Amino acid sequence: MILSDLSLAQMQDYVKGQGLPAFRGKQLFDAIYSAKSFDEVTNLPKNMPQEIVESYPKYKIYRKYVSKDDTIKYLFAFDDGNIVEGVLMSYKYGHTLCLSTQVGCRMGCKFCASTLHGLVRNLSAGEMLGQVLLVNRDLGGNGKERKITNLVLMGSGEPLDNYDNVTTFLKLVSAKEGLNISQRNISLSTCGIVENIYRLADDGFSVTLTISLHASNDLSRRKSMPIANKYSIKEIIDACKYYFEKTGRRIIFEYVLISGENDKDENAQELAYLLRGFPSHINVIPLNKVAERSIKGDNREKCYEFAKKLEKLGLSATVRRTMGEDIGGACGQLRNKVLGGEK
């Protein structure tokens, strides 16, 4: 356990259990949400209980890279030596942070770098929160002034494979006493763990659900996404419809174009059959280069052509803007270790 795993009320209860008054919990909470190291916290007594000192977060920004389009890729280091990546993208409306939910990933999607080394471990809620707090400070924010407007759980890892920690993180990051980021400004991307889509809806969450679909039929999906051997596209869409009924939130479907695999007229028609009449949107995504992968993607012009086909068939579709590709920060490029094995 690290202190950033705790809500304000839990933090106050924790310090009381250590023989300290509740206001010390509030001081710790404020320091953590300002992303201060323990040495920077000046309003605490020098003889703090050792358990509190050891539980204080020690995550940090290990390195950052700035793209030619001003996208920033952050490498976050944890005290066990693991590293995950996150990406900050700037838009007219503000800053969006793409963060990681696991060290690595066990889903095995053939076009993604995050799963190359399998799943190392889950991130705790506080480690996910730490990524947000560190970047917020790097942008000049603190616990009272938030610089990040939107979050995307689309870095390394499958969020619904780490359900308990991810949903605790959603509660922490949206809490009024914390950063107070509305769940309507948070997107959660999943390759489709069906039972946890239902669970997310039943547990009262209202984030934007984004489905990594990438195929229009089960046979094609099984070629690139092992999860398709467990859940059919119909099962996933049925779960999405349930989520929409419970939340009223439109579902986003991600669709990476793989040359000769899922980019034909018949694929567009199959998508139209699956999604027509359902409040959803399709993000057509150019396949970004991953050094260890041989799958070939279509160029951006082909992506626009495919999106137009979908629109003519009555679907809402756009081509996703590629950001941070030159620094390995684009969709599918995030990984759990520095390229070249640097540490």
Image (cartoon, rainbow, N blue to C red):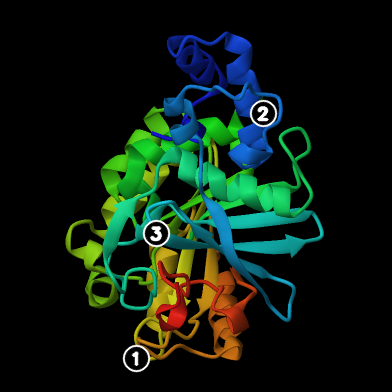
Residue where numbered disc 3 is placed: 81
Residue where numbered disc 1 is placed: 294
Residue 39, given in percent of the width and then of the height, sits at: 63, 39
- Quadrant in which residue 182 is drawn: top right
Identified by mark 2, the residue type is Asp
Q: Secondary structure at mark 3?
A: loop
Measuring 58% from the left and 85% from the top, which residue is drawn there?
305
| Disc 2 residue crowd, few under 14, some 14–19, many 20+, Cα 10 Å | some
Identified by mark 1, the residue type is Ser
Residue where numbered disc 2 is placed: 30
Figure disc tally: 3
Relative to 230, is 177 above or below?
above
Closer to the eye: label 2 or 3:
3
Measuring 49% from the left and 31% from the top, which residue is drawn there?
53
- Give the position of the N terminus as an image quadrant: top left
Q: Is residue 245 left or right of residue 237?
A: right
Measuring 51% from the left and 71% from the top, which residue is drawn there?
331
Q: Secondary structure at mark 2?
A: helix
Residue 57, given in percent of the width and then of the height, sits at: 51, 40
Q: Find the distance from the CA under tag 2 to the CA under tag 3.
A: 26 Å
Relative to 144, is 123 above or below?
below
Mark 2 or mark 1: name the one nearer the start of the chain: 2
